[in-house]
Image: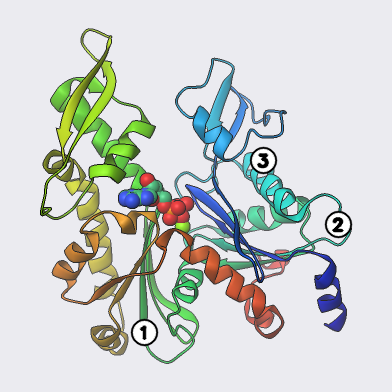
């Protein structure tokens, strides 16, 4: 144990939020040091990662939807499950090396937050990927726990805490107490589905094909769930479906609210279902403690109000919802010695 902490002085232990949209890496004492899209550019039809070193993260995301014929940009975790093990490994390896540097001779210990819905096989894949990518020891923690810790909730205590994490590929809803997850529901409806709903709306209503990036920008800039004090409008460019030529039109926040109602309805339903499955004592605690909303989707205007309306509970937006899970993993790092007995860290378990 002392030996382990000595080694720690020569390596950079890190906490990783391996998200479907974004990967964040935290280093003890330094906070978030890397924040990049979970995207990898590969040669089309293969899982060969492009060689020029920077085909991962920001650079690869720029390529999404506008890649030349021979290249495709892939999000290996898109639906909260690992769609491609090799590409996930390449991505994780790239991020770990980027933070750790190649020169250090002691390998890092790594805490990774994984979606609570992933299977034992997938856990094992993350575990092995991180080891092959250069980790000395790997600890997996469940994302809702990390989110709860990152948000400063009393998840170790005998009272219920509830996290609703609306990410890119999945929404995870969990009720926790005594450092354990009581009820958890995960659905594959989150930010990506909202973007897809906007694309569908633009096609139906305006005969306009818009790209994923454009749809995401529309959502972030004028997306909302509840009527706004001042409704907004945005100019949108795309390709006309009928004529095939580039064209632009103007959409309003009211229209986008319509477009988003279907995916948002499913998220609300998932929250309600989780509440219905909670033990009565835990449900009673939530009347006092409320719900905490995390993940990038939490930033959608009015989602907190809509959830509060539907559940009758208080809904709090956590500080900096996009980095909440990553900050939670770094709290795990700080307590590694004390907590490691309770964390999954042996590949044989999976
Ligand atoms: P993951 O944990 O799955 O990687 P994140 O928590 O990083 O996901 O959230 C990414 C999602 O949040 C994306 O779908 C993105 O479009 C969405 N998002 C980011 N900022 C906003 C915003 N201001 N309003 C609405 N959605 C947002
Ligand atoms: Mg996440």
Residue at disc 2, CB closer than 8 Å to ligand 1? no
- The image shows residue 24 at horizontal and vertical percentages of 56, 55
**Residue tagged by mark 1?**
160
User: Where, by quadrant of the figure, is residue 162 drawn?
Assistant: bottom left
Q: Which mark is residue 43?
A: none
Whether residue 105 sits left or right of residue 248 in the image: it is: right
- The image shows residue 63 at horizontal and vertical percentages of 52, 28
Quick one: SS at disc 1?
loop
Identify the residue shown where x is 75% and y is 64%: 12
Q: Is residue 239 above or below residue 279?
A: above
Identify the residue shown where x is 20% and y is 50%: 224
Quick one: SS at disc 2?
loop
Identify the residue shown where x is 18% and y is 20%: 207
Mark 2 surroundings within 10 Å by alpha-carbon count, few (fewer than 14), some (14 through 19), many (20 or more): few
Of marks 1 and 2, the one in the foreground: 2
Of marks 2 and 3, the one in the foreground: 2
Identify the residue shown where x is 44% and y is 46%: 79
By what rule are the colours in the image chosen? rainbow
Q: Who is closer to the viewer here, 231 or 189?
A: 231
Residue contact at pointers 1 and 3, CB within 8 angstroms:
no
**Residue tagged by mark 2?**
104
**Residue tagged by mark 3?**
86
**Mark 1 or mark 3: whose residue is earlier in sequence:** 3
User: Where, by quadrant of the figure, is residue 94 drawn?
Assistant: top right
- The image shows residue 179 at horizontal and vertical percentages of 50, 83
Residue 214: tell me if it is visible. Answer: yes
Whether residue 331 sits left or right of residue 207 in the image: it is: right
């Amino acid at each position: 144990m002392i030996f382990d902490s000595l080694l720690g002085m020569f390596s950079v232990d890190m906490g990783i939020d391996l998200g479907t949209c974004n990967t964040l890496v935290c280093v003890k004492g330094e906070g978030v040091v890397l924040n990049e899209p979970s995207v990898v550019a590969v040669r089309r039809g293969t899982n060969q990662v492009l060689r020029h070193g920077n085909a991962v993260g920001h650079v690869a995301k720029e390529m999404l939807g506008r890649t030349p014929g021979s290249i495709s940009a892939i999000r290996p975790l898109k639906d909260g499950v690992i769609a491609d093990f090799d590409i996930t490994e390449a991505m994780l390896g790239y991020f770990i090396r980027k933070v750790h540097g190649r020169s250090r001779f002691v390998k890092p210990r790594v805490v990774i937050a994984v979606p609570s819905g992933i299977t034992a096989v997938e856990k094992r894949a993350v575990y092995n990927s991180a080891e092959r990518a250069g980790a000395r020891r790997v600890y997996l923690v469940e994302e809702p726990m990390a989110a709860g810790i990152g948000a400063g909730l009393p998840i170790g205590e005998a009272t219920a805490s509830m996290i609703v994490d609306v990410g890119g590929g999945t929404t995870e809803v969990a009720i926790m107490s005594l450092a354990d997850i009581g009820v958890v529901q995960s659905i594959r409806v989150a930010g990506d589905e909202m973007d897809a709903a906007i694309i569908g709306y633009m096609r139906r209503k305006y005969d306009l094909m818009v790209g994923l990036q454009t749809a995401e920008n529309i959502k972030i800039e004028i997306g909302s769930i509840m009527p706004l004090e001042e409704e907004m409008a945005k100019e949108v460019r795309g390709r006309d479906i009928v004529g095939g030529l580039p064209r632009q039109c103007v959409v309003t926040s009211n229209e986008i609210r319509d477009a988003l109602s279907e995916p948002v309805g499913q998220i609300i339903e998932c929250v309600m279902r989780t509440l219905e499955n909670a033990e009565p004592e835990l449900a009673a605690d939530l009347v006092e403690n409320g719900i905490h909303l995390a993940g990038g989707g939490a930033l959608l205007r009015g989602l907190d109000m809509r959830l509060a309306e539907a559940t009758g509970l208080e809904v709090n937006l956590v500080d900096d919802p996009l980095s909440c899970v990553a900050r939670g993993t770094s709290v795990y790092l700080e307590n590694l010695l004390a907590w490691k007995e309770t964390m999954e860290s042996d590949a044989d378990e999976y």
